[in-house]
Structures are given as C-alpha cells and as structure tokens.
Image (cartoon, rainbow, N blue to C red):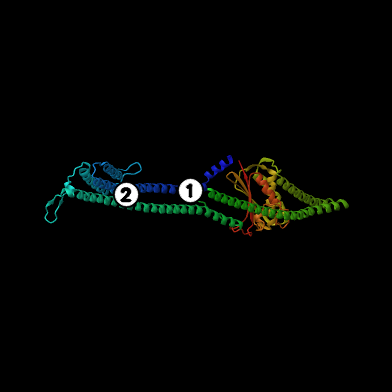
Amino acid sequence: MLKYSDNIFQYIRSKIGLKVGILVFIQLFFIIISFIILYTCQSQMFSFENSINIAENNRFLTSDLMYNIYDHLLEDTSDVSKIKTAMNDLESNIMAIKNGRIDLNPLPAEFSKNWDEIYQKWILLKTILTDNILEQNQKINPVVLVTSDATTGSTITPSKLDIDTILKTSMETGIASLVDSSDRLVTQLREQVKSMAQGILFYQWLFAILTIGVSSAFVFYIVRKILKPIFALTHATSEVTRGNLAVVVKTNDNGDGAFANDELSVLTKSFNSMVTALKNSIKKQNELTKELENANTKLKERDQLKDEFINIAAHELRTPIQPILGLSEFLHNRPPNLEKDEEILNVIIRNSKRLMKLADEILDVARIESGSLFLKKEKFDLNEMILTDILRDYNQMIIENKKNIKLFYKSYDQNPIIVEADRNKLNQVICNLLSNAFNFTNEGSITVIVERKGNEILVSIKDTGTGIHPQIYPKLFTAFVSKSPKRGTGLGLFISKSIIEIHGGRIWAFNNGDGSGGRDQGSTFTFSLPIK
C-alpha cells in the first residue's frame, strides 16, 4: 500500500503527469459546462412544454365549459354549479399559464401580450356567463347581445324567444375567440421550444467541437513536446555512436514556463552532461595519451642519450686511463731520469684530474636527480673569485693550447660584489661555461661580464665562436646533450643549470648578432644570482 501511495505522489510530482492532468481537467471542464448549459436549456424547454400543455388544456376546459352551458340551457335548470366549476378550472388554468405553479415556471415576458389577449377574452366571456347564467339574469348584455342594422343604422333588440339563440351565438363566438388566442400562444410556445431545441443541438455541436479541438490541440502540443526531445535525443545518440561529441540537445528552458523543467528536459540535461563528461574524459584521455607519447619519446631520447653517454663516458674514461697506465708502466720499467720523469708525471697528473672531473660530474648528476645536492654557502667577493681562481688558469690554458683567443673580464661595479653562495659550485658553473666557450671558439675573444641589476647579479660569458647549434638549442641544458668537437659528456650545462636554480637564480643562452639567431657571431650564456 505504501509503495502504491509513493507511486501516486511520484506521478503527481511528474511534469508530464501534470500535462496529462491538465488535459483531463480541460475535457472535464468542457463536459461540465456543456452539461450545465444543456441542463438549463432543457429545463427551460421542459417548462415551455408544460406551458404548452396547460395552454392546450384551455381548449379542453373551454369545451367542457361550453358543454356544461349547453346542458344547462337544454335542461332549463337553475343548477349552475357545474358551470362555475368549469369556469373556475378554466380561469385557474389561464392564471397558471402566466404565474406558474410548483411544476411550472411563470410565462416569459415576451408572451405577455398573447396572454393578455387570452385573459381579456376570458373576462369578456366570463362577464356574459355571469350576467346571463350565473345570476339568472335573462336580459341580454348590451355589450354583447345588442346588434345594429347595417342597412339603416338603427339599433335592434332581440325578442325574448331569440335570447337563447343569441346567447349561444355570443358564447360560441367568445369561446372560439378564446380558443384561437390560446392556439396562437401554443403555436408561439412551440416555435420557442423548437428554437430552443435547435439551440441545444447547436450548443451540443459547439461544445463537442470545442472539446475535440482543444483536446486535440493540447494532445498535439503534449505529443510534440514529448516527441521532439525524444527525436532529438535519438539523433544525438546516433551522432555520439558515430563519434561526434560536439552534438548538443537543446532544452525547453526558453519560453515554456513551468513545463521547461519536466522529465524530458531533465533527461536532456543529463544527456548533455553525459556527453560533456564523455568529451572531457576523452579529451583528458587524449591528453594523457599525448603525455604518455611525449614521455615515451623522452624516454627513447634519454635511452639514446644514455647509450651515447655510455659510449662517450667509455671514451672519456679510456682517454685519460691509457696515458696514465702507459706512462706509469714506462716509468716503472726504465731507470729514473728526473728531467724526463717530470714531463711524464705532468701528463699523468693532467689525465688524473680529467678522470676525477668526469667522476665528479657523474656524482653531481646522481645527486641532482636524487635531490641530494646540497650547498655550502659562504660570503665572498665574486669579482675576486673570477679574477684569481678562474681567469688566471684559463689564460694559461689558452697559452698552452696556442689558440688565437683573447680573454677579457668586464665588471660594471668596481666595488666588491659580495654574494652568499657555494664558492666551489659557483666556480664549477663559471668554469663549465668558459670551457664550453673555449671548445667552440678557435679565434676571437671570450669576455666575462659581471653586472648588478636590481636585486640580482648577472654573470655573462660571451664568445665569438660557432654559436649554438639549432638542433641543440631546444634541449641545451638537458643531460647528455653535446655537439662539442672534443666529444664532452654533455653534463656540464645540465649541472650548471641545476646549481644555479638551487641558488635561486636562472640561466639562459642565445646566439649573438642582430636577433635573427645566426651562429656566425658566437653566443652568450648568462646566469643570475639573487642578492640581499
């Protein structure tokens, strides 16, 4: 029982159920209105039919009165009770036509003239009967029984022998006139009843047409409102099945008032939400797929770089190890010679340092990727460090390699530039950038520029070498990337970028020139350090 009640309340809350309920209400409204109007018309018609019956009864009552009068005249009796009774019945019937009674409504005003005519003729007949019969007065009523001669214009008074004949003639004339008036009233009442019957038929057809028309229009409206979104949803479902997720089903929210939130509109909104969610899901899936493809591409690139790094590392390891091992065995197998041994030991020491640098770079990469690269910050003068710890060694390197390169240092601040940083790591960065410039510059100049801009110190290494290769530029600071003619490990710029970012700075590079990216005028590498 509770479940059935819940279903009823759910149907009442249903917007579609509301529409069907309105349709049923409209039909019931027209049925009730038509019933009321038809009932009223039929009641009036029934009342008119009763009036007709009573008016027709005048003929019978008049005939009965006439029969009683003839019977009285023939029997020549003084008993006039039957005549009085007949007169009273006829008068009551005439008055009932106008005033009505329990089962009869009063006569409508438009028939008053006809009734007045009947009543006047009854009064005239009643006067004749009263004067000449009821009161046993045998004098002829001058109004009725006195006649005139049409030829001479003189008044003629009938003899006593002709009184009965004249009286009968007068009564017959009055009764016939009364009956004619009653018949005319009956005729007019019948015409009224006929007109009302036609009106009832007209109203029946009118309300039938209105009921059918309004119901059909409302049914068409409901069917259209129901089928239109269903067809739209069917079409949209087919489009989604074909893979078209740009389809959107319009709702009835604009212009339909209370019906704009029915079950089909809710279903349409749910369908649009589902398509949107599906679209977003596919979009996200495509993005994830693209990210996976990019990650896979990067993994392939890193795998390729790893292979290249292994080859480079093997070469870089083999290159210093071979002279170290060969010269060590040479020193071990021959007699000591101090002059020649010093030169050999320098070669061994230089290659050992190279080997140590490679090991340090590999360790730095491991620390960077594991997040365990820590700084030992201290305050020092950046100008002094570059001049004493770096440029002096690189000037010696230029002399030893016999390159036609000039090394310049330019500082826009003659005062000490005090920074708080890891001195060794910062030294490593500048050395990496200078080594990079040295490897790609055969002649010209390399300039180290230091300047203060706001809350930052900018350090730039500008060279006149071959510049940055277009293939390298997008991944310039990535590990294992190198186009060096001396086949470096490709770790220097990656390590430098990581060290600068840990300090809270940034590093970038560009080719010199007019801004077109040409490589013929060298390149510039710049990094920033925040200062307090």
Residue drawn at the location 60% of the way across and 52% of the way down: 279
- In the figure, is residue 235 to the left or right of 55? right
Q: Residues within 10 Å of mark 1 (few under 14, many from 20)?
A: few
Location of the N terminus (image quadrant): top right
Q: Mark 2 highlights which residue?
A: 56
Q: Secondary structure at mark 1?
A: helix
Q: Please state which of residues 25 and 463 is positioned toward the viewer in this rendering.
A: 25
Looking at the image, is mark 2 or mark 1 nearer the viewer?
A: 2
Q: Residues within 10 Å of mark 2 (few under 14, many from 20)?
A: some
Q: How many marks?
A: 2
- In the figure, is residue 96 to the left or right of 307? left
Q: Residue 272, position in %: x, y?
A: 56, 51
Q: Please state which of residues 77 and 284 is positioned toward the viewer in this rendering.
A: 77
- In the figure, is residue 73 to the left or right of 225? left
Q: Mark 1 highlights which residue?
A: 24
Tag 2–tag 1 contact (CB < 8 Å): no
Q: Secondary structure at mark 2?
A: helix
Location of the C terminus (image quadrant): top right
**Does any portion of residue 224 appear in the rendered image?**
yes
